[in-house]
Image (spheres, grey):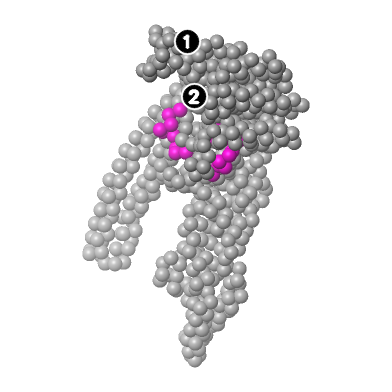
Amino acid sequence: MTDKAKRLQLLQHQLARLERRLNSLRQRSEQFSRWRLILFALGALGSGGAFLQWGPVVWLWVTAVTFIPFIVAVVIHRRIDTAVTRFVIWQQMKQTHIARMTLDWHNLPAPKSFPVVSDHPFAFDIDLVGEFSLHRLLDTAVSREGSHRLHHWLLDPSPKAADVLTRQVRVRELAGQTRFRERLALHATLAVDNSSEQWAGQELVDWLQAENEGRSLRPLLIGLSGLAVVNWLLFAGYQLWNWPPLWIGTILLYGVLFISLGFQRTATLFSDIMFLSDRLRVLNEVFAFLERWHFRQMPQVQQLCQPFLAVGERPSAHIGRIQRVMTGVGLRQNWLLGFVLNVLMPWDIFFAYRLDQCRADLARQLPSWLDVWYELEALNSLATFAYLNPGEWTWPVLTVSDSPTLTATGLGHPLISSGPRVCNDLHLDAEESIYLITGSNMAGKSSFLRTIGVNLVLAYAGGPAVAQSFRASWLRLFATIRVADSLTDGFSFFYAEVRRLSQLLTALEDEEERPLLFLIDEIFRGTNNRERLIGSRAYIQALTQGTGLGAIATHDLELVQLVEETPKLVNVHFRDDVVDGRMVFDYKLHPGPCPTTNALKIMELAGLPIDPQKT
């Protein structure tokens, strides 16, 4: 049994245990539902009987005693329901893990949509985004910004070497910390109420940083507070020492000033209080968890989480302060209580002013705290991929080199299941820098190009590469594998292809940047054979003049002769065979040009007419 099969079996056992535990908790929850009804009925009967038998004084005591069991049952029942929610989320996490391991796309969360420039050098060509994409397979983030952080790492055309190496160390630390990764996700998901919508922290930052009325309330707060004190003194004098009823005039003045100068301004500030409360509940759960965790086995992750571990006032304390202010604001939601409180003192003005102070403090510090959380979520996505696929990957060796190099053994595609996946070796350097890949249709040429690209992207994101070994210098990636025409822009397929190839050549000639790794699936597919061959020869010769590395897949067997003119080119091929009347592919990369073709055979097997004299 492979390591991955053992990991899958472990997850299935955990899922079975969770199911048994959930069934037990649900049964207890149903039992307490019945007990709550029974205890409430008994309490109501006892309370009613006491009132009729002994009057209101005894009734209060009897009611308090008889409803205590009901209140205890309610508290216990809520705890059980919270446990059910936690286990349901945990169960869903395990089920999603299994779906990621088995590439069960129907049971993965829906793909996240982020803007991507239409002429991105590789995003659309190697399936980084979309329905069946690398980002969807990797992404475990609860926050939208965490998903976007991972998206940015995967699509970054020129990541900084220091950032990549730091990320790789942190991913390696997190890969072995399953408990930390899952508990962080659990706390965040619980706080979001297990919503299908991702939590968006930028909305909170925008709200905190927006202009507001709170800062201009201080003079009004001072004035109304002084007037409230005068009201109390005059009313006390009227009641105790028969002073004239001057308090009527001052309280009317107080009310006019409060309504005309403060009511609308506080209403504007309080209008988003529920929005703020929901967002802060999520942050308090996540931040408090990070503050409590001991990072002894993760020194680099501990360094990242330093804002949550520093001596002094931690993020949860700041959030707790603003939550206490919101509690005061919440009292005014009862209109009668709110009216009384605001008559006694400028309650709304005071809490609006305090809310603004806390808001300004949080606006300064929250972005840096959120950045740590988003970074952790993106790192956890890569670490979870490593955890779920043991024995199938390696940590890439990324080196600074005077000449470009890319070598790998046992290189496989992460979006192909481990069963049917066929792995190949790769070696590109300054002397043999371009693979010219020939082969029959469906033999694996395009998949091999995508395999190279997606593993380089994984390596530069800080994650593992699906290979036995993987070593690369710092390269830029450019792929032209999936070219499409554009009705909107008026581009034909051929013109879109020409534009793409022109962009690639321009990137290759930019000597101020890192060397380019280019991946090309067929050159000039949108034109006739004669012109395609002429153009392909010239284009490949232009590519060999640069300092980059690359792989070119082609059906034009005439191009293999270029190896005699250009030593940088290396002929390799994928082959096929016909067994019992059907095509058979081994998907293995072989040296030299392809000795066979299969287009006519595929047409014949599909029932299309062919000329037997031409075969």
Q: Nearer the viewer, residue 151 or 385?
A: 151
Residue 328, labelled with which disc?
none
Residue 217 location (% of width, % of height): 58, 72
- Residue at (25% x, 53% y) in the render: 41
Q: Which residues are magenta?
A: 103-125
* SS category of the residue bearing label 1: strand
In which image quadrant can residue 320 be found? bottom right
- Residue at (46% x, 44% y) in the render: 190
- Residue at (61% x, 44% y) in the render: 372
Q: Nearer the viewer, residue 498 or 258?
A: 498
Residues at badges 2 and 1 in contact (C-beta under 8 Å)?
no
**To which residue does mark 2 refer?**
416
In which image quadrant can residue 174 be found? top right
Residue 334 location (% of width, % of height): 41, 67
Residue 115 location (% of width, % of height): 54, 44
Type of amino acid under label 2: Ile
Residue 577, labelled with which disc?
1
How far is mark 2 from mark 1, CA to CA?
Answer: 22 Å
**Can residue 104 be found in the magenta stretch?**
yes
**Left or right of 303 in this view: 112:** left
Above or below, comparing residue 109 to residue 243 in the picture: above
* SS category of the residue bearing label 2: loop
